[in-house]
Amino acid sequence: MTDVRVLILPGRGNSTDQHWQTHWETRHPAYRRVQQREWQNPDRDDWVEALQAAIAEADTPVVLVAHSLSVSLVAHWASRYSGPVKAALLVAPSDVEAPDYPPGTQGFAPIPLRPLPFESVVVASTDDPKVSLARAERFAEAWGARLEIAGAKGHLGAASQLGDWPFGAALLDRLIDHAARA
């Protein structure tokens, strides 16, 4: 089986110790978090370049695990670059185009709505305060991604108390298998 590089892409503010992304990194030390220079007031171009640098280091297929604002990051990266990315788990996309979205992320709008050139799954909650289910469905459709509904779990972050989040981990395992075969 081919090795696969898993890159963890937290949203704005980074992922705390209580976040499922951090749980997964603890359980899988080979998973690598892409560090951003500025987590609180993100700059789209800086974030895209940090992601590109991490992807360029990979000599194996890459699977991206994005949460919240980093879902938009993946769409922006794919509109500029290509590379060994074979799959992406896109969890709780934030609707940065919504008029009431918190300040500090406007540089991520508009969100590219072109098919992603790799296998992808969008995971949405039915009661996410940062994106309506209709918008999450629209993103999935535009990106050519499969949509998975996680139930009423809020923004699917630390506050959702998902722990190791087996539902998401199973989706990631399937994407890793796909990437290893691609």
Image (cartoon, rainbow, N blue to C red):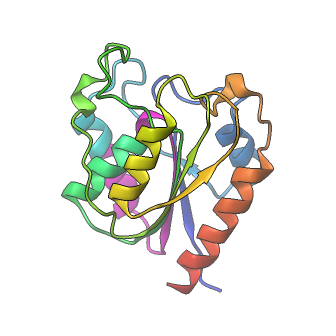
Find residue 48 and report its image quarter.
top left
Horizontally, is 160 left or right of 109 in the view? right
Horizontally, is 122 left or right of 156 in the view? left
Horizontally, is 45 left or right of 123 in the view? left
Q: Which residue corresponds to the image point at 57% horizontal and 28% vertical from the top-left?
A: 128
Q: Which residues are magenta?
A: 50-70
Q: Which residue corresponds to the image point at 37% horizontal and 18% vertical from the top-left?
A: 101
Tell which residue pokes out farthest to the front in this image.
134
Whether 59 is drawn above or below 95: the answer is below
Image x and y of residue 123, in percent: 57, 48
Observer-nearest of 28 and 21: 21
Horizontally, is 48 left or right of 15 in the view? left
Q: Which residue corresponds to the image point at 79% horizontal and 51% vertical from the top-left?
A: 166
Determine if residue 17 is in view.
no
Q: Is residue 23 magenta?
A: no
Observer-nearest of 24 and 124: 124
Image x and y of residue 96, in percent: 33, 28
Image x and y of residue 107, in percent: 22, 28
Count of numbered badges drawn on the protein? 0
Observer-nearest of 129 and 32: 129
